Amino acid sequence: MGTKCLNCPLRNRPIFAPMSDGEVAFMQKFKTGELVVEGGTTLMMEGSNSPQLYTPLEGMGLRYKTLDSGERQVINFVLPGDFIGLQAGVMNEMQHSVESTTPMRLCVFDRRALWQLFKDHPERAFDLTWIAAVEEHFLGESLAILGHMSGIERIARAFVRLHDRGAALGLISAARMPLPYRQQDLADALGLSLVHTNKTLTRLRQQGVATWRDGSLNILDYDRLCQIAQLPTDRTPMTRPLI
């Protein structure tokens, strides 16, 4: 069975909203086991009707769509605590694919029990609705970024968002956060060419703002990075539910 929900290492992170004893007990019943995968494993395939839902406990991945040309468009990055598979649970098939970038350990849930969650645990059902609403919000923000921000502003905002998420999850050590993606993944997610992305990363490094190399993100000047990203430095982290 792996990690019991009562002992979940993510629950104590301030970024996640507290859960009642009843909610923890339900999640333990909702959870059917754990899955350990290597990097490069397809967790969910676009168009598939997956019987399982996941929450990563460890490791990182990405969500992407496959274009008619066969090319891959990265949608966003998957970190511990994210909920994977809600589309399949509600729409009966995935509208995008999910792949592990690093080795991952995931909590596994039975999609057939999703209706029971809505029926017997409205608080948990609201949490799922909240997650869907926030994903819609960030999709809107992403469209605004692609339409109105320069390359350096897009990358700066991506780095701020990823750094903030990493900090909330306790992934940052000595000012460094593991970021094991390829430059092509970042370029795809931000609508940039690989050449433009590489030149912009060099510019951020030369300005002493941030470096990203060997799978590690190092923010050298957080305030300046936020300024470039057009984000305030005194933001209050958004508490989110943990499924």
Image (cartoon, rainbow, N blue to C red):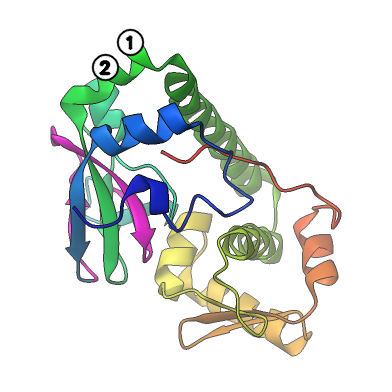
Q: Nearer the viewer, residue 76 or 20?
A: 20
What's the magenta region?
39-66
Q: Amino acid at mark 1?
A: Lys
Q: Percent from the top left, x then y, of residue 29?
A: 25, 33
Quadrant of image for the C terminus = top left
Label 1, secondary structure: give it: helix
Q: CA distance from mark 2 to mark 1?
A: 5 Å
Q: Nearer the viewer, residue 37 or 62?
A: 37
Task: Specify whether residue 164 is in view.
Answer: yes
What's the residue at 40%, 47% (across, down)? 6
Give the quarter of the image for residue 70: bottom left
Label 2, secondary structure: give it: helix
Q: Which mark is residue 116?
A: 2
Tell me the residue that label 1 is attached to: 119
What's the residue at 65%, 85% (across, down)? 174
**Could you tell me if the residues under marks 2 and 1 are in contact, i.e. CB atoms within 8 Å?**
yes
What's the residue at 60%, 74% (across, down)? 172
Task: Specify whether residue 75 is in view.
Answer: no
Q: Percent from the top left, x then y, of residue 119?
A: 33, 10
Question: On screen, 191 above or below 163?
Answer: above
Q: Is residue 229 magenta?
A: no
